């Protein structure tokens, strides 16, 4: 019996051909594939007859971690070809890698993100040796465009150079040990028949060593002696009668599923189970070439998947012709001029580059370079995307962007109708049909109507779960907006099913899934109060009242590290309004909102006491934060905001000359608002002491802005401080008054017109003058002109006094 380990690059047509031809030639007892072992009982789902590309999506959720992972398959994926060829020859099919939810995959969002990326130095040496720009061009040169009969030998050499004897990281070491146990078990179960393993090339050298009995060195015969006509590496099998060290575990599937072993087979490694309290599941999802494209950000994808599809179906020469035709057609559709002469020049350039680079026909990069040379005449600001490894960067020439998009292709997979789907898909589909949201069109929801509110919640849950095709055009932006109607646009979207399947990891219903997603956003927000507030408002819009028992602690932790008074004030004001009043959205009295109210009020008080900003102008948002604290103490006392502590802190800040003037005024107003009729405990400074201290250094206007913003009622109340303020403002020198005048005008804007009229009437009465306060407020001259007139009067008086014509304070006619 023999073991054949084929090291592949995921999504490589050349590797897929090698896999198919090797399995067909050897007709092995087992075909082992790098893939999630927890899907072994469901391999039949993969073989239903889907339109590729598709992917196995795995989700994992516990109190500490939420993880999603994809294992994509297209027609030219070696793993998919292994499934197809293995089924045709009657082999038993096994996925042999750890489940994608396993902690070994915690740092990657797709299974095929091999750790070979950590060995970029070896790749760079090879790129230098062959005179190519990056690993993709290197792969095309060495493998895809190389002689077909040498593919196996070239792969062996390539991956030996990349990995060699180097140790992998902890996660890859665990995966390789697990895969090796499957390989050894398969060798025992196969008896004298061959076993073929298809794994990422990075893992191949290690698995050859680990699959050998007692750790003895594995052998890798030359091309002439390999058991496969394409010369994949082979290793001796385990001796007959040996067994893996792990206990037996049943690996089964539905009766009649091709390639699935019988339940209860002994000798196979255990498939790990999720930890207690965690949920994990795997489902097939439709995938797309856009998501598969390395230019689009897929970590271990091949760039330009549509090109490689053509290479797989028709060969390199036809793929090069397709590439030029597809690019020209796309550019013309976009209004870019592409003449026949341009195409002739591009083709001639590509063929010349192919000869220069030693290719029998133009490769992908040859054609792209030829197109760029023929179609782009100006200098480029950034490197061409196929000259580097990664996504298409900003600043690319428009023709280059269209070229990469044309080669990406627009293929979208489709699942077979019999494919099992997670509960969320069925639940969401039923709700969409129930409320007429399964058809494209415009929808209006009335939040005051129970039916409209229910429809709104369904749409918001879909939005929160990022299901494409549902867009809100208008509606309330905060919990205190007076907007009571929403406008939505519903569109059919090709990725809706995939998004619903992927969102199924959050929960079985739209409500539970949205609640889990919002709780995760709160956890991810940390101290970002804007993100926390957005998440809480989304919870209100979704009708989610239970975010989990741990969410209050998360909210409190997030607020405890916030450091912006203005943002804290906005969050507190909106959250308090939702907690107090919003019975429409069902948030009144919410426990989660109550936690935010109490924590934000305490945090503002703590931050403000040490807030020193000398010379800074008055900040209305900081004043608003103090107003929010006032309302929280007055209206949410039961949530744990200590009134006495708030008064004590207010007194200290009001007396702190290093604090910004508007904060001193605001906290003076806060303390007076929270005090009873008197202050027997002496928690607060006397009015005359605090107010007189503010009227120094030209800061009177800012101090009054803080006071009026928080406690204007204290100014107007009988026995208030209006008379004291009048004396102090009247006592300002001309220079100080002119300096303070803009801030004074802004401060009095906190009073509505009726209250400003009341102040004017009291000031007239205090001076023994008749007239109407309303008339006094109607100035026919701009305030700037009045200020300039005062300044002129002051200057004239000063000159007259210097000339001895008048005495300061008295004018002689």
Image (cartoon, grey):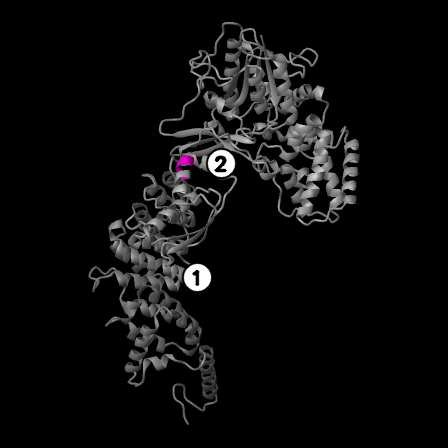
Q: Please tell me whether residue 130 is drawn above or below residue 714 in the rendered image.
A: above
Residue at 38% from the left image edge and 70% from the top image edge: 749
**Magenta region, main secondary structure:** helix
Pick the residue in front: 646 or 56. Answer: 56
Residue under pointer 2 = 498
Secondary structure of the residue carrying numbered label 1: loop
Q: Quadrant of the N terminus?
A: top right
Secondary structure of the residue carrying numbered label 2: helix
Q: Which-is-in-front pick, marks 1 and 2?
A: 2
Marks 1 and 2, Cα distance to the nearest angstrom?
A: 55 Å
Residue at 41% from the left image edge and 58% from the top image edge: 612
Report x, y in % for residue 628. 33, 57
Looking at the image, residue 517 sits to the left or right of residue 348; the answer is left
Report x, y in % for residue 143. 68, 25
Q: Which mark is residue 810?
A: none
The span shown in magenta is 424-428
Residue at 62% from the left image edge and 12% from the top image edge: 219
Looking at the image, residue 660 sits to the left or right of residue 10; the answer is left
The question of residue 32 being in magenta is answered with: no
Report x, y in % for residue 649. 30, 56
How many residues crowd around disc 1 within 10 Å: few (fewer than 14), some, or many (20 or more)?
A: few
Report x, y in % for residue 465. 44, 41
Q: Residue 516 falls in which quadrant of the image?
A: top left
Q: How many marks overall?
A: 2
Residue under pointer 1 = 614
Q: Please tell me whether residue 54 is drawn above or below residue 204 in the rendered image.
A: below
Q: Earlier in the sequence, mark 1 or mark 2?
A: 2
Q: Residue 509 falls in which quadrant of the image?
A: top left
Q: Quadrant of the C terminus?
A: bottom left
């Amino acid at each position: 019996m023999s073991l054949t380990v084929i090291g592949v690059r995921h999504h490589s047509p050349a590797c897929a051909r090698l896999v198919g031809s090797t399995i067909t030639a050897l007709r092995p007892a087992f075909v082992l594939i790098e893939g999630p072992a927890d899907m072994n009982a469901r391999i039949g789902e993969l073989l239903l007859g889907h339109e590729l590309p598709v992917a196995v999506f795995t989700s994992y959720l516990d109190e500490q971690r939420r993880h999603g992972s994809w294992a994509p398959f297209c027609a030219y994926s070696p793993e998919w070809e292994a499934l197809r060829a293995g089924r045709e020859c009657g082999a038993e099919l096994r996925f042999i890698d750890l489940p994608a939810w396993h902690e070994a995959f915690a740092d990657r969002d797709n299974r095929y993100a091999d750790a070979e990326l950590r060995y970029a130095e070896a790749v760079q040496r090879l790129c230098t040796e062959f005179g190519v720009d990056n690993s993709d061009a290197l792969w095309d040169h060495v493998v895809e465009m190389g002689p077909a009969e040498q593919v196996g030998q070239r792969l062996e050499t390539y991956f030996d150079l990349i990995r060699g004897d180097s140790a992998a990281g902890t996660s890859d070491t665990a995966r390789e040990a697990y895969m090796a146990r499957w390989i050894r078990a398969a060798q025992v179960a196969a008896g004298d028949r061959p076993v073929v393993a298809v794994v990422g090339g990075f893992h191949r050298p290690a698995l050859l060593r680990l699959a050998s009995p007692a750790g003895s060195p594995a052998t890798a015969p030359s091309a002439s002696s390999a058991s496969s006509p394409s010369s994949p590496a082979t290793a001796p099998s385990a001796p007959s009668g040996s067994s893996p060290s792990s206990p037996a575990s049943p690996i089964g599937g539905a009766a009649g599923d091709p390639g699935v072993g019988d339940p209860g087979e002994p000798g196979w490694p255990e498939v790990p189970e999720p930890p207690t309290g965690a949920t994990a599941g795997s489902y097939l999802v439709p995938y797309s070439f856009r998501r598969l494209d390395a230019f689009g950000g897929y970590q271990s994808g091949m760039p330009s998947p549509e090109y490689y599809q053509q290479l797989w179906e028709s060969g390199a020469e036809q793929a090069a012709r397709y590439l030029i035709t597809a690019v020209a057609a796309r550019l013309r559709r976009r209004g870019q001029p592409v003449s026949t002469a341009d195409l002739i020049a591009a083709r001639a350039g590509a063929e010349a580059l192919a000869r220069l680079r030693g290719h029998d026909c133009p490769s992908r990069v040859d054609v792209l370079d030829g197109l760029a040379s023929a179609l782009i005449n100006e200098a480029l600001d950034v490197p061409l995307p196929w000259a580097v490894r990664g996504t298409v960067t900003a600043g690319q020439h428009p023709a280059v962007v269209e070229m990469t998009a044309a080669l990406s292709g627009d293929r979208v997979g489709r699942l077979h109708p019999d494919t099992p789907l997670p509960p969320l898909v069925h639940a969401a589909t039923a709700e969409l049909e129930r409320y007429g949201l399964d058809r494209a069109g415009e929808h209006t929801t009335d939040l005051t109507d129970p039916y409209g509110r229910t429809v709104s919640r369904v749409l918001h849950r879909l939005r929160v779960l990022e299901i494409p095709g549902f867009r809100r055009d208008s509606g309330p932006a905060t919990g205190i907006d007076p907007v009571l109607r929403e406008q939505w646009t519903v569109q059919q979207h090709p990725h809706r099913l995939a998004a619903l399947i992927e969102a199924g990891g959050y929960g079985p219903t739209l409500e539970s899934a949205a609640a889990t997603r919002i709780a995760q956003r709160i956890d991810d927000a940390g101290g970002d109060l804007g993100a926390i507030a957005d998440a809480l408002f989304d919870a209100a819009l979704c009708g989610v009242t239970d975010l989990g028992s741990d969410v209050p602690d998360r909210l409190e932790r997030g607020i405890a590290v916030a450091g912006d008074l203005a943002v804290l004030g906005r969050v507190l004001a909106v959250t308090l309004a939702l907690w107090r009043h919003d019975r429409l959205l069902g948030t009144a009295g919410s426990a989660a909102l109550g936690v935010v109210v109490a924590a934000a009020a305490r945090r503002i008080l703590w931050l403000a006491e040490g807030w020193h900003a000398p010379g800074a102008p008055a900040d209305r948002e900081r004043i608003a934060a103090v107003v929010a604290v006032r309302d929280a103490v007055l209206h949410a006392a039961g949530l744990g905001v200590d009134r006495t502590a708030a008064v004590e802190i207010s007194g200290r800040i009001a007396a702190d000359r290093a604090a910004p003037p508007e904060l001193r005024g605001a906290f003076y107003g806060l303390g007076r608002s929270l005090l009873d009729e008197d202050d027997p405990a002496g928690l607060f400074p006397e009015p005359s002491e605090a107010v007189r201290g503010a009227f120094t250094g030209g800061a009177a206007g800012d101090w009054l802005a803080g006071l009026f913003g928080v406690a204007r009622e204290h100014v107007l109340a009988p026995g208030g401080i209006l008379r004291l303020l009048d004396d102090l403002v009247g006592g300002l020198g001309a220079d100080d008054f002119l300096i303070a005048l803009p801030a004074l005008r802004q401060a009095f804007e906190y009073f509505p017109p009726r209250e400003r009229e009341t102040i004017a009437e009291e000031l007239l009465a205090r001076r023994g003058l008749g007239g109407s306060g309303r008339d006094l407020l109607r100035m026919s001259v701009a305030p700037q002109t009045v200020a300039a007139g005062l300044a002129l009067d002051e200057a004239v008086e000063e000159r007259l006094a210097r000339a001895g014509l008048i005495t300061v304070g008295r004018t002689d006619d």
